[in-house]
Image (cartoon, rainbow, N blue to C red):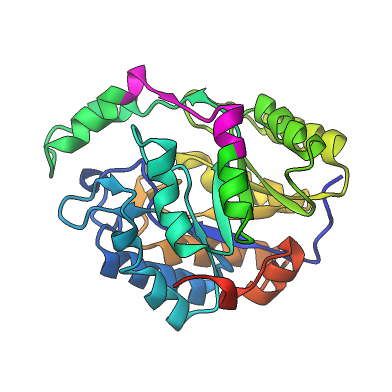
Amino acid sequence: MARANKKVIITCAITGGIHTPTMSEYLPITPDQIATQAIDAANAGASILHLHARNPENGMPTPDPDVFMQFLPRIKEATDAVINITTGGGLGMTVEDRLAGPLAAEPEMCSLNMGSMNFSLHPLAYRYTNWKYEWEKKFLLASEDFIFRNTFKDIAYIFEHLSACGTRFEHECYDIGHLYNLAYFVDQGLIKPPFFVQSIFGILGGIGADMDNVMFMKQTADRLFGDDYIWSVLAAGRYQMPFVTQAAMLGGNVRVGLEDSLFIGKGELATSNAAQVTKIRGILESLGHQIATPDEARKILGLKGPDSVKF
């Protein structure tokens, strides 16, 4: 089974590539907003910060390393949190696009989606009528005919390029088959333990947000990986807090943040990423859990340390 941790790692996904500016005025877009919210989330208790970049002019996801470099050094200077950069990027980006930021920064961690999938956001396009930017509705509607590509060749390409600089991965598993894809790469010797498995629920195209599926994913990972992996959970939208709480009760770690949900409660927008971190930290501590510091998270995950990055 997953390695038992004495302390829970809280990851905070700051902005992502799913939600658009119209959906929440609190979604960070500019480098300054991303940096400020990331630092505040770390101060609230997040030991890992999962980061995407956005075009500061209109909030559209961008892979531009220059944009990443406008906020990565500031976050590193202000906090000792582990910085985790996406290799998922945003809809329509090539694998080369998605690697541009990580290869420039050589971070301690990167996220890595463990399989191709339908990844659809198009129902969100019908919830709003007045859009801040022209690209938003078109972007969401286009996802109805979109396949998020992560072939075995793509995954191996990302492994090889980032492993060479000592980067380790948050293995994002949106379905049971993604766990088996990960097992294949473990068997090939491309991934060495301990590895960090992020089970994801509630994305249209992935495994559904049913509590039974949390156990199903964990039991499958336990069978495939034994005690070689560290388990974490995130869930989209309204499922966020109940699912991550359940994961912690089962001995896992948690991820929150405005990438995964814009809300703090039913019908109530979260005013910041730090607000979500504060809420889940309070829940976990009330259940008797202790929260891992960044250095404790580094030790648990076998990370190279902040002195070995390029920002």
Place of residue 251 in the rendered image (x, y in percent of width and height, measured from the top left)? 78, 53
Residue at 84% across, 57% down:
4
Place of residue 34 in the rendered image (x, y in percent of width and height, measured from the top left)? 33, 64
Q: Quadrant of the C terminus?
A: bottom left
Residues 119 and 242: in front is 119
Residues 218 and 94: in front is 94
User: Measured along the vertical axis of the image, is residue 63 above or below residue 136?
Assistant: below
Residue that extends furthest to the bottom in the rendered view of this protein: 77
> Where on the picture, by quarter, is residue 91?
top left
Residue that extends furthest to the top in the rendered view of this protein: 145
**Left or right: where 128 falls relative to 284:** left
> Where on the picture, by quarter, is residue 17?
top left
> Where on the picture, by quarter, is residue 97?
top left
Magenta segment range?
143-156
In magenta segment, residue 58: no
Residues 292 and 278: in front is 292
Residue at 33% across, 43% down:
19
Place of residue 246 in the rendered image (x, y in percent of width and height, measured from the top left)? 68, 46
Place of residue 296 in the rendered image (x, y in percent of width and height, measured from the top left)? 71, 73
**Left or right: where 180 falls relative to 266:** right
Query: Visible in this render: residue 288?
Result: no
Residue at 34% across, 25% down:
143
Query: Visible in this render: residue 252?
Result: yes
In magenta segment, residue 150: yes
User: Measured along the vertical axis of the image, is residue 147 above or below residue 26?
Assistant: above
Q: Quadrant of the N terminus?
A: top right
**Left or right: where 200 falls relative to 56:** right
